[in-house]
Amino acid sequence: MTLEQLRQWLQHQIEPVYGKQESAVIARTLLYHFGDTSPSAYQLIKHNTASPQIIDSVKEAIPMLLNYTPLQYITGRAWFCDLLLEVKPGVLIPRPETEEMVMMIIKTLNHDLPHNTAILDIGTGSGAIAITLARQWEYCKVHAMDLSLDALEIARQNAIRNKAHIEFLQGDILDESYWPALPGELHLIVSNPPYVLNSERALMKLNVLKHEPGIALFVPDDDALLFYRQIGRFARKNLRSGGRLWLEINESYPRQVEEFLLEEGFSNIKIHRDFRDKFRFISAVNEK
């Protein structure tokens, strides 16, 4: 069996679950991964005989795919802002929307960060946000926190792999008794906190519901602003005057988050749309 025949066979096996277009993308991606090759190089070798190791890897992947295991968990990696990150079950897979927020932050602040700048990423997960910012501004002091020890270990490995200098902290931002252990006099706080309502589960894909960590996704229906309230209050105390707060938000609650930040005393509050034209981010300035 050639590599191309193997790819076609894999696509056929998973097509009933993913449909023709998505199954084709998945099959190509896995063949590139298992063959340790690029799309262009694959074209030169696709008629070569598939090795027993690649065949076995494909066969092992099929039951996982039919059980809606995310492709990133099968390959163990995900791309974010041109950085290759390790991801495993228990750690949220970085999203393109979050990547877009980071690019907005970099574009907005690129020429406005002093060399003693301190940054905190709240709920770092795989470390995607913190690592990207640490690579962008190597002279800054970047901190990243998460409740999950498993996530922090993966984030540390990703930071080492991508040569990013970050101080990692374990703790719960909802627990105010933990706040004194976090850095103060921050110039920038960034967070992509849990914001999906439990009632919105029915709208989500099975690969997310069955495999990604619910603790990083969901909030109670009766407390949609749970994390925004705590992060906003923490930011009001720990951001320097003129410091910036950036949050990824539920598209259904931009005005509620905006109103809360206004009540807390933030200024220059802006709601930003993502590439799908949904209200997805909010930024604010802490004027003291």
Image (cartoon, grey):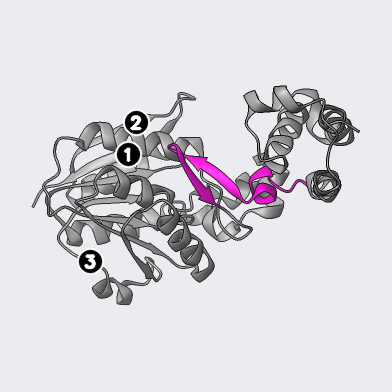
| Callout 2 touching callout 1 (CB < 8 Å) | yes
Measured as percent of width and height from the top left, residue 9 is found at 89, 32
Q: Nearer the viewer, residue 141 or 171?
A: 141
What label does residue 272 carry, if any?
2
Q: Which of the two marks, 3 or 1, is nearer to us in this view?
A: 3
Q: SS of the residue at dot 2? A: strand
Tell me if residue 59 is in the magenta stretch: no
Q: Mark 3 against mark 2, which lies toward the viewer?
A: 3
Give the residue type at disc 1. Ile
160 relative to 252, above or below: below
Query: What residue do we see at 39% from left, 67% from top?
Result: 174
Q: Residue furthest right?
A: 1
Q: Is residue 1 visible?
A: yes
Report whether 26 appears left or right of 200.
right
| Badge 1 element | strand
Q: Range of the magenta residues?
A: 68-86
